[in-house]
Image (cartoon, grey):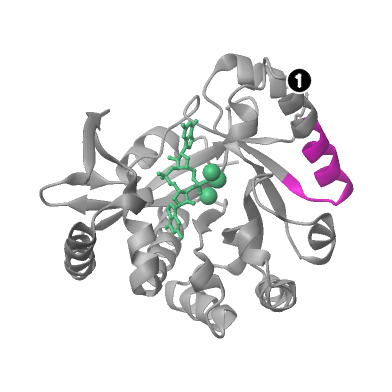
Amino acid sequence: EVKKNFKNGYQIYTNALHVHLDEKLALESDLRKGLANDELVLYYQPKFSITGEKVLGIEALVRWQHPEKGLVPPGVFLPIAEETGLIFDIGSWVLKQSCLQMKQWQDDGGLQIPISVNLSSQQFHQMNFDQHIHAVLIETGLEAKFLELEITESMMMDAKTSTRTLQKLSDLGVKISLDDFGTGYSSLSYLKQFPINRLKIDRSFISDITNNDHDKAIVSTIISMAQHLKMDVTAEGIETKDQLDYLMQNESMEIQGFYFSKPLPSKDIESLYMKKAIV
Ligand code: C2E
Ligand code: MG
Ligand code: MG
Ligand code: MG
């Protein structure tokens, strides 16, 4: 059974994985139609300098603007897309749309910052994924250095294939971020061998950071490890001034979270953040 509650204008489905089979089939055929009818939309969440003065990058986050159900979050439909193989079309659409949008912001507004795109495991592991990325860059005209791909530790389980794919992507000039860092199963030797540019510290280590000594220790360890490995760091899920103040000592850290900005439609990014994004 699908539980619904209406919060913040969103329709939130809890327990998406336990949806009944018939609900799931309905959702699948709906999603297939939705994709064909251009119902997917991208929201964009800026990433800021620690002072909040500059926008250093923008992450694209997909939503489904369902004609009756409203704005459906990715946690609801991406698992179904993954089960049914729709993830390949959705993933390609997200990539192309993200690159087009950033290219347009560059051409119209002079932006010189990267767009971050989340990848699903199947997408990352598809044959010749680097060639797909190359084709999207050519088609959209975005320079490789302005595309940042977000992968997670769990996608790197097959270390040998992953290294090869990551190396090819890195040779193209795109940037690689390790998302939700600290929650997966990555061995530290992966970090050494993968060409990774950025670690994104998972929100779960941030939420209680002002009180919890273990979280403090973990976060400062990740930061100093990243520095030694010459990787950049983003803290995700900053919601309060206290969390931000705690991180203040790390001047070079990039900050993402509701405290500075929620994910927004592209028009709102343009009206609110274009000036801050021109460094
Ligand atoms: P993620 O990549 O780790 O993205 C961060 C998620 O946390 C987003 O949820 C964002 O809205 C939310 N968030 C950001 N700041 C805060 C904060 O301060 N507090 C709280 N409570 N939440 C915050 P969203 O958009 O629902 O996305 C959830 C996940 O779905 C993403 O996690 C990502 O793994 C996946 N996802 C989103 N878009 C795509 C996509 O285009 N492709 C793929 N493969 N996955 C995507
Ligand atoms: Mg992400
Ligand atoms: Mg994340
Ligand atoms: Mg996360």
Q: What residue is disc 1 on? A: 213
Secondary element under disc 1, as helix, strand or loop, is: helix
Residue at point 73%, 74% (across, down): 167
| Nearest the eye: 255 or 90 | 90
| Nearest the eye: 77 or 44 | 77
| Quadrant of the image containing the C terminus | top right
Look at the magenta stretch and give its main secondary structure. Answer: helix
Residue at point 68%, 14% (across, down): 211
Magenta stretch containing residue 194, yes or no? no
Q: How many marks?
A: 1
| Nearest the eye: 93 or 276 | 93
Find residue 67 and report its horizontal and vertical position in percent: 11, 52
The three-letter amino acid code for the residue at tag 1 is: Asp
Residue stretch rendered in magenta on the structure: 220-232
Is the CB–ligand 1 distance for label 1 below 8 Å? no
| Nearest the eye: 242 or 136 | 242
Residue at point 50%, 58% (across, down): 117
Q: Is 106 left or right of 177, judged from the image as shown?
A: left
Magenta stretch containing residue 224, yes or no? yes
* Image: 162 above or below 120: below
* Image: 185 above or below 10: below
Find residue 218 and report its horizontal and vertical position in percent: 77, 33
Residue situated furthest right in the rendering: 228
Residue at point 22%, 45% (across, down): 2
Picture quadrant where residue 238 is located: top right
* Image: 254 above or below 131: above
The answer, for residue 42, to whether it is visible in the render is no
Find residue 3 and report its horizontal and vertical position in percent: 23, 39
Disc 1 crowd rating (10 Å Cα; few below 14, some 14-19, many 20+) is: few
Find residue 14 and report its horizontal and vertical position in percent: 32, 40
The answer, for residue 101, to whether it is visible in the render is yes
